[in-house]
Image (cartoon, grey):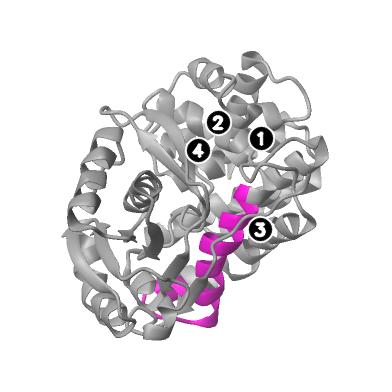
Amino acid sequence: MRRLIAPASYVQGRDVLSNADSFAALSADRALLLGGETALSTAESDLRSGLEAAGIDVVAVERGVDTCTFDRIDELVERVETARANLVVGVGGGVALDTAKAVSERSGTELAIVATIASTDAPCSSVSVVYDADGGFDEYVHRRRNPELVLVDTAIVAEAPERFLRYGLGDAFATRFEAETVAGSWNGTHAGGVPTDAASTLARRSFRNVADHGPAALAAVRRDAVTPAVERIVETNTLLSGVGFESGGLAAAHAFGKGFSRVGAKAPHGLTIAFATIAQLVLEDRDADVLEEALRVAGSVGIDNALSELGIDADLEAVATESCRDDTTMSNEPMDVTPSMAADALATADELLEEI
């Protein structure tokens, strides 16, 4: 079975938050907003204007959402029920948005995602990554459907620090290679089927856009500018990579990412995934020209970090062991990957990236 899943509506552009038409996909009328302090301070005023113009009342606001744990999710579900909200609006980056998805799923509300940075491909997906009290990976929560609405105001994204866009480029960088692996092995995706041609096409386009438009987009956001390159890369990091990973599939790169998380590595997700993508290409013995292109593109957008540059001083054998556990996407590789094979691929990737 082939299956593709995606948000019901995706709206991107300058000043879209205050536009009533942006919310046309929603039928709810009572919203709880949740997000980090910085994100809400940036977006709340325009967001309230747009919601109110669309006939949606803001009945509660939860600020300072900076952890996605089951305890925090349970607290917020109670807040939704007390406020009698039928819409959860998550505002911010990965943690706040993952929290919003899980809260919406548990409370049975509609969900709107307002991404204020383009640092991951999580906004469009149905997946939440839940962490334990120590900040380590706990488990995934899957919402039964993707968000009813994803909103991205590119003026807000462009004003955020450049590093966030770079992190998103790291996540998008992996999408093509993981989707190719899953398509070749005919294994399943987060969408619950084998990849469609549409998902594979989006995954390939993600890498091409990183290569063609990434450097110009990074240059623009250093000056808080919104240019066509910024629009393309925000869409790439958010929509193309989001649908591409969820319906195209994940493989060794995100398995390695989970391994790093489980041993306590604190480097940004996108930069860790970019490193892990090179390790995946080594593991799969990809053609030399594919590996060389990947290394070149990584260097062009500044995601060519060796472990020492990421501040990771991890036991690669431990990372490899965690990466090969049954609950990772390492099983989507076309061969049985042992911890020793995984550790050797990680060590080789580190050497290649040290040489750049």
- Ranked by sequence position, the earlier of labels 3 and 4 is 3
Camera-near label (4 vs 2) is 2
Callout 1–callout 2 Cβ contact below 8 Å: yes
Drawn side of residue 17 relative to residue 81, left or right = right
Camera-near label (4 vs 1) is 1
- Please identify the quadrant where the N terminus is shown: top right
Residue at numbered disc 1: 280
Crowd class of label 2 (few under 14; some 14 to 19; many from 20; radius 10 Å): many
Q: At numbered mark 3, what does the secondary structure look like: helix, strand or loop? A: helix
Q: As rendered, which of 39 and 142 lies closer to the eye?
A: 142
Residue at numbered disc 4: 306
Q: What's under tag 2, amino acid-wise?
A: Phe
Q: What's under tag 3, amino acid-wise?
A: Phe
Q: CA distance from mark 3 to mark 1?
A: 15 Å
Residue at numbered disc 3: 207
- Ranked by sequence position, the earlier of labels 2 and 3 is 3
Residue at numbered disc 2: 256
Q: Quadrant of residue 321?
A: top right
The kind of secondary structure the magenta stretch mainly shows is: helix
User: Is residue 321 part of the magenta span, yes or no?
Assistant: no
Please report the residue visible at 66 percent of the width from the left and 58 percent of the height from the top: 207
* In the image, residue 317 above or below residue 33: above
Q: What's under tag 1, amino acid-wise?
A: Gln
Q: What's under tag 4, amino acid-wise?
A: Ala
Please report the residue visible at 66 percent of the width from the left and 41 percent of the height from the top: 192
The residue range painted magenta reads 219-246
Count of numbered labels shown in the rendering: 4
